[in-house]
Amino acid sequence: MMQLYGYLRENGTYGIRNYVLVIPASVCASHCAVQIAEGIPMAVALPHQHGCCQLGDDFASTVRTLAGFGKNANVGAALVVGLGCEGIQAKDIADEISASGKETASLIIQEAGGTLPAIAEGKQIVSRMASKLATQQKVPFDASALILGLECGGSDPTSGIASNPAIGVASDLLVQAGGSSILSETTECIGAEHLLAKRFVDAAQAERFLDMVRRVEDHAIAAGQDLRQGQPTPGNIEGGLTTIEEKSLGCMHKAGTSPFLGALEYAEAVPFDAHGLYFMDSPGQDIDSITGMVASGAQIVVFSTGRGTPTGNPIAPVIKITGNSETYEKMKDNIDINAGRMITDGVSLQDMGQEVYDCILRTANGELTKAEALGHREFGIYRTGYTY
């Protein structure tokens, strides 16, 4: 197996990238965060529209997401920027991140004297952090330290026939090597939830997973929509999927055949001491789903798409794979792997899965994905409640 090299973090995890993350505690600090990160190599900002006037589970989910990104192994240091009067306080996020052992600081715009002084002070902090990280050397690590996010979107029948099963083989290979994978998108388990529930090693965790599926359906029904009555996504309909069950039965193949160890809330951390396959509650919306898995600890994501998509992530490389050779030819600049060769050229499922796994390992060793090379850094936090 390929020897992997990454950045050892203080809590024993390994990063495959080495970013300084500038996290706005709320939408009110997003502009400053972007300005602070601009022009500093290795610095990345997370502009978003949340962080104030949120309550309950919705508030907690945003906190978990922001702190989870800061704690992700691909981040070497973090600055949390707040306005000062928002619901989510910058110091609280910074304290949670610093508990992982990495260098963390917070900055309050109102205390700094406004936008311009805050940007100047923030740039000094981030520049110092980036200079320190630039001296860090990579060290050998094992594939057992990898956490892989599994995503699919903009699907067509080839997703369930080729690309998702190939991802499932790669996920199984990683789990067999001692690593972890995360299956998400609760909406896209509807119709296949009984099949997935049988694979949980713990009955309580299986019931927790089924509760998550029921929660999504109940929420949709309360909004006047029955998800089982059709396929709600126009792109999937045009791709040839007529029901949510058809989408779900194809989606579940990303999880391979490994047993599920547990069901996680959105952005809940994957346990350090129990590696394997997990489910994470998330919407079917691709960006929000990937964001949640990266906040849970995923250093790398594999994303299948029959229709084609360019999206990436601010701190985790996203590998694109399609089961549709026509889509690959149309979007070669965006898609890394053509699993459509299983259909057109007779490539076996096992060989294609191995190809996906090998790409995961090369990416973990520093090879850029096409989304990274093009600068795609999409970020979106799953909202579960109203803004008050």
Image (cartoon, rainbow, N blue to C red):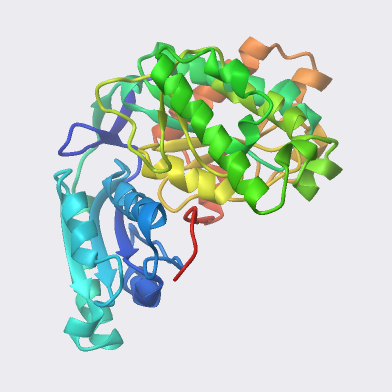
- Is residue 95 shown left or right of residue 33? left
Point out the image quarter for the C terminus. Answer: bottom left
Residue 348 seen by the camera = yes
Residue at 31% across, 43% down: 72
Residue at 46% across, 15% down: 200
- Is residue 321 shown left or right of residue 10? right
Q: Quadrant of residue 366?
A: top left
Please tell me whether residue 113 is drawn above or below residue 135 in the rendered image.
below
Q: In the image as oriented, which residue stretches furthest toward the front?
A: 222
Which is more toward the observer, 200 or 147? 200
- Is residue 200 shown left or right of residue 334? left
Which is more toward the observer, 168 or 55? 55
Which is more toward the observer, 253 or 366? 253
- The image shows residue 69 at horizontal and vertical percentages of 34, 49
Point out the image quarter for the N terminus. Answer: top left
- The image shows residue 214 at horizontal and vertical percentages of 57, 34
Residue 151 seen by the camera = no
Please tell me whether residue 246 is drawn above or below residue 313 in the rendered image.
above
- Is residue 285 shown left or right of residue 263? right
- The image shows residue 318 at horizontal and vertical percentages of 52, 41
- The image shows residue 195 at horizontal and vertical percentages of 61, 16
Q: How many marks?
A: 0
